[in-house]
Structures are given as structure tokens and as C-alpha cells.
Image (cartoon, rainbow, N blue to C red):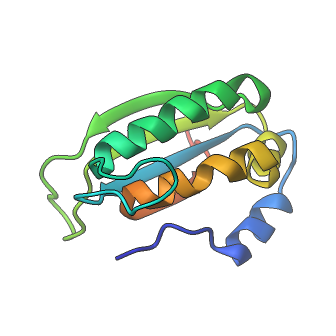
């Protein structure tokens, strides 16, 4: 548990791809019972703290184009034993916009709220096979 920070090797591989290609990011999220102290979310549940992050992320959306395509509560884990609370698919118009977002000072200022809210997460770059 606790995998909430980026895999540097994966980011390098991602940034080597076509910068103009759209990307869909699969987010698997597990909230902390109580958010880590600091970052303006003291005393909040992990879920409430993630909602704070989500609102701040939405404010950045016009610059980076991240549009949630689907969001839902994770229920029964039919295969595997990882336990997630939330699943989100977010589409970015270009790979460059996603990479630029991660390097942006405004995004980096809100990223600690995400980390404080989450016990565990996965963020997986995907490409559609069917169009």
C-alpha cells in the first residue's frame, strides 16, 4: 500500500511517446480513513480531502484539458484482491498536456492534497484498441 507517487521510469517512457496523441488515464483510488495532517485537509476523511483535491484539479482543467469520462464506486473484486474505493477514467487531449500538468507549479501545489487523501492508488496510461 501507499503507492501514491509517480513512477519516474514510466513518466520518461510516457513523455517519449507522440506528444500530440490523446491519452486516457485509469485511476484506481483507495482513500485513507483520515487524511494525513497538513495541506489544509486536517481532520477530514480521505474521501473529503480527495474531493478538495478534485475541486482544485477542476480549476486547472481548462489549461490541461483533463476531462473525466467515467467515474464510479469500486464494488466487488471478482479477480484479484486489491481493494479500491473509486475508479476514474480521465481523457487528456494530448500526452503533452498531461506531462505539462505534472510539471506545472500550480498542479504541484495541489498534489500533496491528493497524497494526503489516498492510502493507495494506481494511475495507468491507456490507449484504445477499438475506435
Between 127 and 30, the one lying in front of the other is: 30
**Quadrant of image for the N terminus:** bottom left
Q: Is residue 34 left or right of residue 100?
A: left
As drawn, which residue projects farthest toward the top?
Answer: 62
Residue under the point 59% across and 27% down: 58
Residue 47, position as x, y percentages in the image: 30, 44
Name the residue nearer the viewer: 38 or 117: 38
Residue 77's place in the image compared with 94, above or below, is below
Identify whether 24 is placed above or below 43.
above
Residue 23 is left or right of residue 97, and the answer is left
**Image coordinates for residue 62, horizontal then vertical, percent:** 73, 22
Is 5 rendered above or below residue 70? below
Residue 120 lies, in percent from the top left, at 37, 66
Determine whether, in the image, residue 53 is placed left or right of residue 47: right
Q: In which quadrant will I find the C terminus?
A: top right
User: Would residue 26 be visible to someone looking at this image?
Assistant: yes
User: What residue appears at the point 29 percent right and 60 percent down from the top-left corner?
Assistant: 32
Q: Reply above or below: 36 against 111.
A: below
Residue 38 location in percent, x, y? 48, 59
> Tag count in the figure?
0
Instruction: Please give the name of the residue rendered at 78% of the width and 51% of the height, measured from the top-left corner.
Output: 99
Place residue 116 in its image quadrant.
Answer: bottom left
Say which of 63 and 56 sits in front.
Answer: 56
Using the image as rendered, state which of residue 123 and residue 129 is in the foreground. 123
Q: Is residue 131 visible?
A: no
Determine whether, in the image, residue 120 is placed left or right of residue 21: left
Amino acid at each position: 500500500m501507499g503507492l501514491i507517487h509517480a513512477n519516474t521510469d514510466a513518466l520518461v517512457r510516457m513523455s517519449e511517446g507522440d506528444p500530440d496523441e490523446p491519452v486516457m488515464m485509469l485511476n484506481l483510488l483507495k482513500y485513507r480513513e483520515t487524511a494525513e495532517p497538513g495541506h489544509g485537509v486536517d481532520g477530514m476523511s480521505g474521501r473529503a480531502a480527495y474531493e478538495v483535491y478534485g475541486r482544485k484539479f477542476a480549476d486547472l482543467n481548462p489549461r490541461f484539458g483533463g476531462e473525466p469520462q467515467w467515474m464510479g464506486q469500486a464494488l466487488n473484486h471478482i479477480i484479484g484482491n486489491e481493494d479500491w474505493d473509486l475508479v476514474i477514467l480521465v481523457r487528456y487531449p494530448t500526452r503533452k498536456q498531461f506531462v505539462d500538468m505534472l510539471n506545472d507549479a500550480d498542479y504541484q501545489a495541489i498534489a500533496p492534497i491528493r497524497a494526503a487523501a489516498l492510502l493507495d492508488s494506481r494511475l495507468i496510461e491507456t490507449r484504445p484498441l477499438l475506435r
